[in-house]
Image: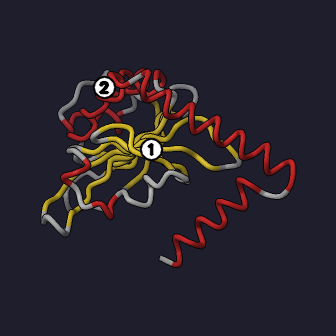
Amino acid sequence: MKVNIVQLSIIFLCLYGCGASGQKALKEFNNLKAEVKSNYDTNKKSFSELKSCLALKYIKVIEFKENEKVAVEYKMSDTSKWEKVTANTNDDVIKTLLDKEGIPADYLLNLEKKLGAIKANRIWIIDDYDTEKGVNFKAFEIKYSKQVNDLHFFYKIYDRPLDSIERSHYALQTQDSIGGILDKDVIFYYR
């Protein structure tokens, strides 16, 4: 818990600072937080369509760069280590990964459009384990494209309703000063 308090203190200082500049930063932060909430409300269908990412087994991170480049963190088998590559979406390594996942070649182009529609460019698939219930679950984190004072907002979408997951997996992130619950399986937060 000490780490969380230290992290929150640092974030507080980054955001609020001192004097007038702190007030300006607080206003920018609150405006961006409201924008993130509104973005979800406006684009619920687009967020829901992204759940297909939860089926990915060998790709953990996809981040779209400029000039049709994509950065991917992946592994080629269940026993291999995670590797990273930045390449064009039609590069052989990318094509091999898509084949291994059993998804069509235009998957990344469609994903890039969907992420662009919700003002995001990065998705991170998370495999996790609920010790209380003894079950595996998946989630994915989407990084919102705007930031304030180097703090980024994220959406996290779970493969099941939040009430079926041990609360410790999302309790800190959903505190009102940090983020909140947007839907039965979606939270948002900053870090």
The relative height of residue 3 versus residue 86 in the rendered view (above or below) is below
Check disc 2 and report the residue beneath it. 107
> Could you say where residue 79 lies in the image, as x and y percent from the top left?
21, 62
* Residue farthest toward the left in the current orientation of the protein: 134
Look at the numbered disc 1 and give the secondary structure of its residue.
strand
Which residue is located at x 14 percent, y 64 percent? Answer: 133
- What count of labels does the image hold? 2
Label 2 to label 1: alpha-carbon separation: 25 Å
Residue type, numbered disc 1: Phe
Look at the numbered disc 2 and give the secondary structure of its residue.
helix
Color theme of the render: secondary structure
The reply, left or right, for residue 155 in relation to residue 21 is left
The reply, left or right, for residue 145 in relation to residue 15 is left
Q: 103 or 94, which is in the foreground? A: 103
* Residue farthest toward the bottom in the current orientation of the protein: 2
Q: Which of marks 2 and 1 is nearer the N terminus?
A: 2
Count neighbours of disc 2 (C-alpha within 10 A) and say few if under 14, some if 14 to 19, many if 20 or more. few
Which residue is located at x 26 percent, y 49 percent? Answer: 162
The reply, left or right, for residue 173 in relation to residue 8 is left
Quadrant of the frame with the C terminus:
bottom right
Which residue is located at x 78 percent, y 57 percent? Answer: 17
Nearer the observer: mark 2 or 1; the answer is 1
Count neighbours of disc 1 (C-alpha within 10 A) and say few if under 14, some if 14 to 19, many if 20 or more. many
Check disc 1 and report the residue beneath it. 188
The reply, left or right, for residue 126 in relation to residue 14 is left
Which residue is located at x 18 percent, y 68 percent? Answer: 132
> Could you say where residue 94 lies in the image, as x and y percent from the top left?
35, 36
> Could you say where residue 80 lies in the image, as x and y percent from the top left?
26, 61
Residue type, numbered disc 2: Tyr
